[in-house]
Image (cartoon, rainbow, N blue to C red):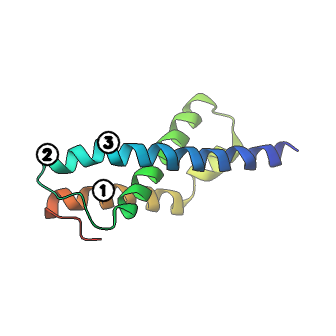
Amino acid sequence: MDQLKGYYWTIFEVFLALLIGSITTNVIIRQLYELNDVQFSGNISVIWFSVSFMIYGLESLIRLLIWKNSEQLKKRISGYFFWSVFFISIIIVLIPIFKGEIPY
């Protein structure tokens, strides 16, 4: 039963990260891109998903610092896939600032 509860909590975390990522993309990232003369148009869902995964990753790291004995969080963070997607999502958000446009 505890494992099932953990899965439900993870699904809740993902949906919460997607919601917060959407708000962050439309409020903060839009302002950041406009300050750097990047037109905020095109496939914004790529940016939204990247911001959402960054939030999910940061939330996982913060929770691991608080609850150090959580095996589920340790397994999540110890995976290469987690870290590679986390760093790729950071790069996806930064590419339009360096390129001057959203290439997606």
C-beta proximity under 8 Å, tags 1 and 2: no
Amino acid type, mark 2? Leu
Question: Which residue is tagged 2?
Answer: 35
Q: Amino acid at mark 1?
A: Val
Is 44 left, or right, of 103 in this rendering?
Answer: right
Residue of label 1: 93
Disc 1 to disc 2, C-alpha distance: 14 Å
In the image, farthest residue toward the bottom: 104
Quadrant for the N terminus, please. Answer: top right
Instruction: Name the quadrant containing residue 67.
Output: top right
- Give the label on residue 27, or none: 3
- Image point 50% across, 46% down: which residue? 19
Give the residue at x 82% y 48%.
4
| Element at label 3 | helix
Quadrant in the picture for the C terminus: bottom left
Q: 26 or 70, which is in the foreground?
A: 26
